[in-house]
Amino acid sequence: MKQKIIALLLFVISCQLICNNLKAQTPDKMSYQAVIRNLENELVTNSTVGIKISIIKSTINGQIVYAEEHSTITNSYGLINLEVGTGYPLTGNFSGINWWDDNYFIRTDTDPYGGSYYVLHGVSQLLSVPYAMHARTAESISGNIVETDPLFSGSPAALLTEIDLIKLSNLTGVNTGDQDLSGLVTITSLTDSLSILRSEIPIINGYLIEEVDPLFSGSPAAMISELDIINLSNLSGINTGDQDLSHLVTINSLSDSLSILRSEIPIINNYLIEELDPLFLGSPAALISDEDIINLSNLSGENTGDQDLSHLVTKNEFEDSLNIIRSEIPDVGSFIIDEIDPYFSSSPASAITEADILNWNNKQDAIVAGNGIIISGNVISTEFQQENYSSNSEPEFTHYIGELYGGGVIFHLWKDENGNEKGLIVSLNHISTSSGFSNVTTDFIGSSSRSLWDGNTNTNAIINQQGHTASAAQLAREYTGGGYTDWYLPALDELNLLYNNRYNVNRTLASTPGATQIGHNRYWASVEHSENCAWAFYFYNGFTYYDFKTKLYFVCAIRSF
């Protein structure tokens, strides 16, 4: 079942006027930005996404005059940048849209997983911004144009003649006699006016000779003379005789005080010669002598004669005790000769004899074995013809699914008609996370690249196509993991086998340093669909589908043994 995906897009569309040359031609494209989110409203970061842009005419449900597809990669913030008009065209011609003749809407469809399973996001009307591109129609206007706008015809601008325009363009800023400047002031007049203003400013030099503010006169500041100010400015921080320091202690006085303090501290060396604490004296610790302490420090853990072990049992005595206990256990061998349980006696089991048990064990001998069934004594087994079987538990195989082998990890095992063991191996890493199918996107390769199960033959056909220079198949062929050179791009059936066994494969990849696990990605298969499309495999749900060869998908390589 196809999973529905919701992509939350926050987009900004603006027309870009790019100066391609001196004529400032307007390009046929619009800038487009989008932030991609998945169903859980999580940002889709550093991933390939598919975008479909449609331009709709007249109404939201109107005619689609242009549509295109883009495949691009989001950055670490989930942001993509596109140019509408430069994608893979599906319908119409972007440069042929007449933006001026109707209302237009833009529709966005997205596939956050990079394919073409688009989900409609929304439709928005294009307002004023895209119509800047309509300016390109002015590039080809020629001939006489008659202005019929009544507002313009009734304005003073309608009276301007070509001669007026020539005169206006010739204005230099210098009066050549056709300008009336009588109402303007000259520089000379302005200079004279400034001189008059300066002459009218009164002289106030003698106005503030004495301070008569009563608040100032009554404050201590009024008593400060010029001599006081000079004395204050000469203060150096050193007592020059004008400072009273009699109440301060000197360094010498402080040192003398410390000496006095030290001399008054009593000597207590002999105060604690004997312990008189009654609690200590009454405890066992008071009896510990210096010799006891020496003896305690010399204890080795072995009995040297100073330890009383008389109350402990020896190993021999312990074993003797066990023997005595065993000898005292009564023999109950003959206690339960007969079964007297009334429940058992009344059940069918009481009628089973030793002969019945023997017959039951030999019951297989009476079975006629069918095809593939073997009876040997008391053992029944099956003889299974192994072909295209990949169970890890089959003893016929020397290898197993998930084994690190041959430059990668085994994901499929089978035996050929001669009983020879065969297998398929997947590369330890993705060969690419963003590759197109092939650079040749408009020509058929043919039936040689359409095998559903033989990826090796398909790979050769893709690489040998005329005009081929790069492809997912070539990336797989050039891979040399483990020193092997026979890697190829898998076909659809081979990718399906890998999908079905990816649990065992990913367990091994997860524990292999430097390896990359198989994720929920879209992988190119080596199977062509048409001249411009090829098949891909979606490891999220096991779907196979075809898409444009220009799309960017993951690539893994496989080889066989």
Image: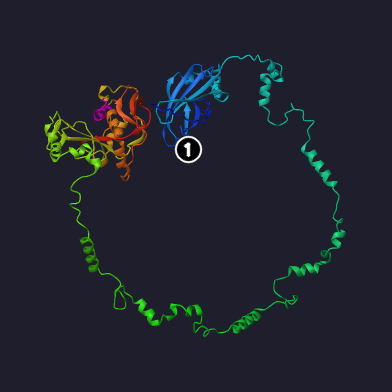
Q: Nearer the viewer, residue 367 or 73?
A: 367
Query: Residue 554 is drawn in which quadrant?
Result: top left
Q: Name the residue located 25 percent from the left edge and 66 percent from the top edge.
A: 318
Whether 375 is among the magenta residues is no
Task: Answer left or right for 321 relative to 24.
Answer: left
Q: Secondary structure at mark 1?
A: loop
Task: Answer left or right for 395 relative to 230.
Answer: left
Q: Position of residue 107 (x, y in %)?
A: 49, 23
Looking at the picture, which amino acid does disc 1 mark? Tyr
Q: Name the residue located 39 percent from the left edge and 28 percent from the top edge.
A: 115
Numbered range of the magenta stretch = 451-464
Q: Nearer the viewer, residue 427 or 275?
A: 275
The residue at which mark 1 appears reads as: 77
Query: Residue 424 is drawn in which quadrant?
Result: top left
Q: Nearer the viewer, residue 467 or 423?
A: 423
Q: Is residue 315 above or below residue 439?
A: below
Count numbered badges in the picture: 1
Residue placed furthest toward the bottom = 270
Whether 457 is among the magenta residues is yes
Q: Position of residue 351 (x, y in %)?
A: 18, 38
